[in-house]
């Protein structure tokens, strides 16, 4: 170290301390950067996995909604067909009762005959 002081005019100790400080700062910076890069990679992986899970959950929910809508439409079509069949049967029954009422010899009476009461009760 004496020869460095002779060459640099007494600044050898300062230069060595500066080089040591520079080495420490460089190693700290490299370690910080390496840790930061690893942390960033870890968080990016977690974020990407989360995004994949969100997309999968969204797709599953959309699929479930489409299936539920398809089942509801099928049930609605079946109910409509049943209602139309019931309506046609009721219309046919009403037509038959109307024809019977028109053919009833007591249709012009003031009160209801036994046949009229039975026809009215049969509509329920």
Image (cartoon, rainbow, N blue to C red):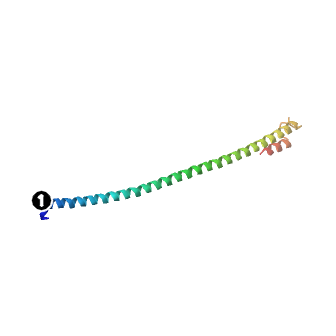
* Residue 103 rendering spot, x and y as whole percentages: 88, 37
Residue 74: tell me if it is visible: yes
Q: Mark 1 = which residue?
A: 7
Could you say whether the residue bearing mark 1 is in a helix, strand or loop?
Answer: helix
**Is 120 situated left or right of 66 in this image?**
right
Q: Residue at x 83, y 38 (%)?
A: 98
Question: Neighbour class for label 1 at 10 Å: few (<14), some, many (≥20)?
Answer: few
Q: Residue at x 59, y 49 (%)?
A: 65
- For this rendering, which residue is in front, 99 or 26? 26
**Outermost residue to the bottom:** 1
- For this rendering, which residue is in front, 120 or 112? 120
**Outermost residue to the right:** 105
- For this rendering, which residue is in front, 21 or 11? 11
Q: Residue at x 24, y 60 (%)?
A: 23
Image quarter where the C terminus lies is top right
* Residue 24 rendering spot, x and y as whole percentages: 24, 61
**Is 85 situated left or right of 23 in this image?**
right
**Is 69 situated left or right of 89 in this image?**
left
Figure check: 106 above or below 78: above
**Outermost residue to the top:** 108
**Is 33 situated left or right of 95 in this image?**
left
* Residue 35 rendering spot, x and y as whole percentages: 34, 59
Report the label total: 1
Figure check: 57 above or below 4: above
Residue 111: tell me if it is visible: no
């Amino acid at each position: 170290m004496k020869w460095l002081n002779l060459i640099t005019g007494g600044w050898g100790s300062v230069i060595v301390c500066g080089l040591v400080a520079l080495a420490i700062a460089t190693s700290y910076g490299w370690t910080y950067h390496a840790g930061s890069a690893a942390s960033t990679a870890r968080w990016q992986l977690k974020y990407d996995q989360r995004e994949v899970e969100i997309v999968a959950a969204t797709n599953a929910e959309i699929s479930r909604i489409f299936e539920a809508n398809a089942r509801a439409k099928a049930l609605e079509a079946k109910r409509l067909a049943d209602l139309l069949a019931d309506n046609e049967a009721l219309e046919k029954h009403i037509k038959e009762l109307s024809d019977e009422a028109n053919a009833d010899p007591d249709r012009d009476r003031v009160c209801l005959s036994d046949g009229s009461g039975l026809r009215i009760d049969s509509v329920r």
